[in-house]
């Protein structure tokens, strides 16, 4: 028989459990934002890691990017989605190794290269780009919901759906963060099945041979395709260690990230590519409506957007926490969520998506080249994580006044080169030349003019 005292104790336990959960989210973020996570927390296995990156990549912007790849013609686009994605994901995996080894988020690791304070510059750039990605995902999610709902009921109100999406993802990030792995385990099979089904319907309606024969009159240069894929993969770079620091072992960090990113990015872009060929419209909502997928389509859109934006919002908060450790993290999350929704309601935002990709590519391609050269070639993987967290001149990564000016200047030169190249040499793309050039220049400058001790 349960005594009264027993009941009361149980209630107290439930109450404690609930309040503890709610308080833990911001605390967790704060601790992790700055600290080295203990090895005992490195528990994410290969498949959970693959799920994380699959869910990250499966979101409507990848349909749009896939749509823009249709300009290569079917056969070349399909090959590019596979091999091009492998190529641009490799630097991401290399960067992920830093998270696994040093056990800190990417932007804290950037302190080793840019200086304790110098790292604030990429951290802010990252937080801002993530708000941009968050807004893009939210806006396409809102407008796709609107397309499906208005086809079914006649009721149309894009702003309402955008705001609702914004609220849901904010709540999930703030309170349900711990359930994200669970959410992803459910969504991965669902999303995979639904997108395979959508692809199957489109191929059946249009005809496989018509599809494979598709070739535009003047196909776009291959290297421009690489730029689109690279903008996607390199945009994940500044947050990859936020997740790989939890990897159980090396293969979970690299093979898990590769499998998930490749399946998610290439798979979903492939669906977007077919959709744009079949409907002649790069906007995926017309595909969803024309297939008459209704409720399943809504499910794909909402699940994929929320699982992606929880990551965008979480990592943008981590970047802000690195710069402003004194602001309470829950305020940063709410601020980020409100900013994402606020940007998403700007009219015709998505019309600027390709420009957004160019800006993102130009900032993060040279940044990642510099980080990789520094960690693997100059520091030879020897980094003192404790020293990275010392916020004053006694840190071994203080450089001068907290800034490694050389790294910052070379990075900015890279940003400029990336933006100028397409005007000078329109067919070679900007990613590969900028990456190689900046890697060589940074290596040479640091080698040829060693610092005074
Ligand atoms: N960081 C990101 C890269 C690419 N897509 C996103 O939604 N987020």
Image: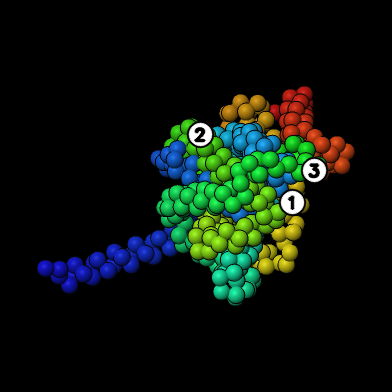
Q: Are marks 1 and 2 in contact (CB under 8 Å)?
A: no
- 140 w.r.t. 246: above or below: below
For discs 2 and 3, the disc positioned in front in the rendered view = 3
Q: Which residue lies at the image location 60% right of the left edge and 43% below the top edge?
A: 208
> Which is more N-terminal, label 3 or label 2?
3
Instruction: Identify the residue position indicated by label 3 in the image.
Output: 217
Residue nearest the observer in this picture, 226 or 212: 212
Report the disc number at residue 408: none
Instruction: Identify the residue position indicated by label 1 in the image.
Output: 354
C-alpha span from label 1 to label 2: 30 Å
Instruction: Identify the residue position indicated by label 2 in the image.
Output: 255
Q: Which residue lies at the image location 84% right of the left edge and 39% below the top edge?
A: 426
Residue 107 shows up from this direction: no
Q: How is the image coloured?
A: rainbow
Position in image of residue 215 (x %, y %): 73, 41
For discs 1 and 2, the disc positioned in front in the rendered view = 1
């Amino acid at each position: 028989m349960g005594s009264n005292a027993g009941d009361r104790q149980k209630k107290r336990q439930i109450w404690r459990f609930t309040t503890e959960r709610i308080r833990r989210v911001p605390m967790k973020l704060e601790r992790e934002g700055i600290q080295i996570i203990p090895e005992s927390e490195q528990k994410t296995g290969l498949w959970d890691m693959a799920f994380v990156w699959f869910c990250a990549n499966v979101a409507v912007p990848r349909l749009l990017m896939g749509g823009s790849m249709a300009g290569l013609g079917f056969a070349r686009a399909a090959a590019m989605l596979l091999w091009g994605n492998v190529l641009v994901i490799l630097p991401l995996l290399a960067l992920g190794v830093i998270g696994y080894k040093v056990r800190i988020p990417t932007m804290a690791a950037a302190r080793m290269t840019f200086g304790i304070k110098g790292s604030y510059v990429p951290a802010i750039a990252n937080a801002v780009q993530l708000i941009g990605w968050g807004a893009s995902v939210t806006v396409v999610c809102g407008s796709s919901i609107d397309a499906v709902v208005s086809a079914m009921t006649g009721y149309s109100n894009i702003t309402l759906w955008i705001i609702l999406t914004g609220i849901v993802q904010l709540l999930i990030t703030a309170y349900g963060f711990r359930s994200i792995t669970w959410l992803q385990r459910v969504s991965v099979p669902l999303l995979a099945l639904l997108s395979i089904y959508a692809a199957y319907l489109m191929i059946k309606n249009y005809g496989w041979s018509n599809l494979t024969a598709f070739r535009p009159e003047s196909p776009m240069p291959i290297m421009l395709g690489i730029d689109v894929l690279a903008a996607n993969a390199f945009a994940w770079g500044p947050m990859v260690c936020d997740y790989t620091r939890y990897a159980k072992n090396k293969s979970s960090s690299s093979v898990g990230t590769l499998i998930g990113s490749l399946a998610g990015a290439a798979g979903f872009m492939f669906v977007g590519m077919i959709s744009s060929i079949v409907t002649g419209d790069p906007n995926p909502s017309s595909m969803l409506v024309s297939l008459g997928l209704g409720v399943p389509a809504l499910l794909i859109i909402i699940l994929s957007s929320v699982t992606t934006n929880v990551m965008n919002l979480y990592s943008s908060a981590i970047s802000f926490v690195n710069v402003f450790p004194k602001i309470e993290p829950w305020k940063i999350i709410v601020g980020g969520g409100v900013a994402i929704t606020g940007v998403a309601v700007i009219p015709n935002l998505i019309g600027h998506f390709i420009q957004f990709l160019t800006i993102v590519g130009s900032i993060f391609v040279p940044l990642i080249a510099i980080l990789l050269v520094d960690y693997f070639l100059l520091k030879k993987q020897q980094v003192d994580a404790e020293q990275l967290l010392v916020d004053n001149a006694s840190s071994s990564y203080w450089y001068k006044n907290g800034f490694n000016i050389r790294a910052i200047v070379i990075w900015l030169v890279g940003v400029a080169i990336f933006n100028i190249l397409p005007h000078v040499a329109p067919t070679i793309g900007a990613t590969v030349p900028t990456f190689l050039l900046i890697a060589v220049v940074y290596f040479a400058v640091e080698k040829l003019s060693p610092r005074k001790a």
